[in-house]
Amino acid sequence: MSVGMTAESSLYEIVGDLVVFRSLSPVDPQIPGYDQAWAEMGMPGPERPRKQDPAFARALAWFLRRGRALNGVRTQLTELIYLGDTALADGNAFRNVRAAGGWRGWAFIAAERDETLAVDIREGIFHANRWNALAEFAGWLLAEGAALDARTAVIVDIDKTALGARGRNDTAIDRARVAAIEATVADAVGEAFDRDTFRRAYTAIIPARYHPFTTDNQDYVAYICLMISAGFIALEELLRQVETGELASFADFIGRVDARQDALPDAALRALHREIYGLVQAGDATPFKAFRRREYIETVSRMGCLPDDAPLGQRLVEEICLTREVFDFTRWLAGRGCLLMAVSDKPDEASLPTPELVAQGYLPLHRTRTHVVGQPLADLLPGS
Ligand SMILES: [Mg+2]
């Protein structure tokens, strides 16, 4: 297979501003966000659902209908195409949105592995081990009788699908996040920061066996690394308490820090703790705002960052690229009149610049340009 690099582009060139991050507030100002429209959506209250919830899918279906109706288009949506990289999460989201819309639908889920093409089709979901299988997916959709026109809604997952293709370029996304956690902790701890202590702590608490404690929430992971780096508790002691059940949950841990704030080395750390603690108490799932704002910077600074002639191997490790196959496939669908929407589970703070950064020229994630890497599909798609 030829994985090639072409010029730079952005998600915006595929989906415009029809982009939804975790807050369920479409970037396009013509479509009201969850905060304003929850009652109209038929939701019980303003509390935003998470990706796994059927209510999340109902909101996405509502945004798609509103998106279709922009500019006076009267066509009703009847079918859904969903592109993602994670069998469980994206598979569930696809089934939930299809059910919420009352549509028929098909999904494509891929992770690149260095093998010959293997495809597994189950209950309308086309699982593949290569992103270039989108060409076969297109043929299959037409054989299934998909209209692929103005009646078709298309959801494109952003993380590790449209950007940073899973199995090919996804570690670049992970590196941005780890760099953000490390830089945030280093800033907060100041001169006392010790990189080895931080890295040992981070590596020790991310395995799945500690997910009951961290709930795999990266804000919690970052906060725990901060407290270890600040000397509030030693890594070994924390792990011992988690293993013995003395520390039952993250809420338990941050509560103990709150009760012993005097043990924190300085006023700035105490203030940072109090900010995070307050947001945790308020039910915010992304309470470590400084980390998430840093994640935005570390992410966009890895987009379009290498020169055009950088070696492909280096690019796939260091640069977060657009996935050529997804780019070509979605452009093909757009050319047929389908409605496209990009969805990300990233918090808005990790996806959109602050006003200060806007003034410095920073752009939202979906408008940030980067190289488009992968196999060109344009000539392989039906009718091209
Ligand atoms: Mg994804």
Image (cartoon, rainbow, N blue to C red):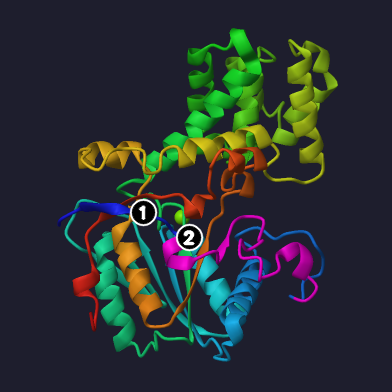
Q: Position of residue 366 (x, y in %)?
A: 49, 55
Q: Is residue 219 left or right of residue 367?
A: right
User: Quick one: quadrant of the N terminus?
Assistant: bottom left
Query: Residue 324 sits in which quadrant?
Result: bottom left
Query: Residue 286 sits in which quadrant?
Result: top right
Q: CA distance from mark 1 to mark 2?
A: 23 Å
Numbered disc total: 2
Q: Residue at image x 15%, y 55%?
A: 2
Q: Is residue 168 left or right of residue 54?
A: left
Q: Position of residue 210 (x, y in %)?
A: 57, 34
Above/below status of 342 relative to 244: below
Give the structural element (helix, strand or loop) at label 2: helix
Above/below status of 279 relative to 122: above
| Residue on which the image places disc 1 | 322
Front position in the image: 151 or 114? 151
Q: Residue at image x 70%, y 34%?
A: 250
Q: Dot 2: within a 10 Å radius of its alpha carbon, few (fewer than 14), some, or many (20 or more) residues?
A: few
Going by the numbered disc 2, the residue's amino acid type is Leu
Q: Position of residue 264 (x, y in %)?
A: 75, 14
Farthest-out residue, right: 259
Q: Residue at image x 34%, y 63%?
A: 327
Chain part drawn in magenta: 12-40
Disc sitting over residue 216 in the figure: none
Residue 281 in magenta stretch: no
Q: Dot 1: within a 10 Å radius of its alpha carbon, few (fewer than 14), some, or many (20 or more) residues?
A: many
Front position in the image: 168 or 382? 382
Q: Is residue 238 left or right of residue 306?
A: right
| Residue on which the image places disc 2 | 88
Q: Earlier in the sequence, mark 1 or mark 2?
A: 2
Q: Residue at image x 31%, y 38%?
A: 306
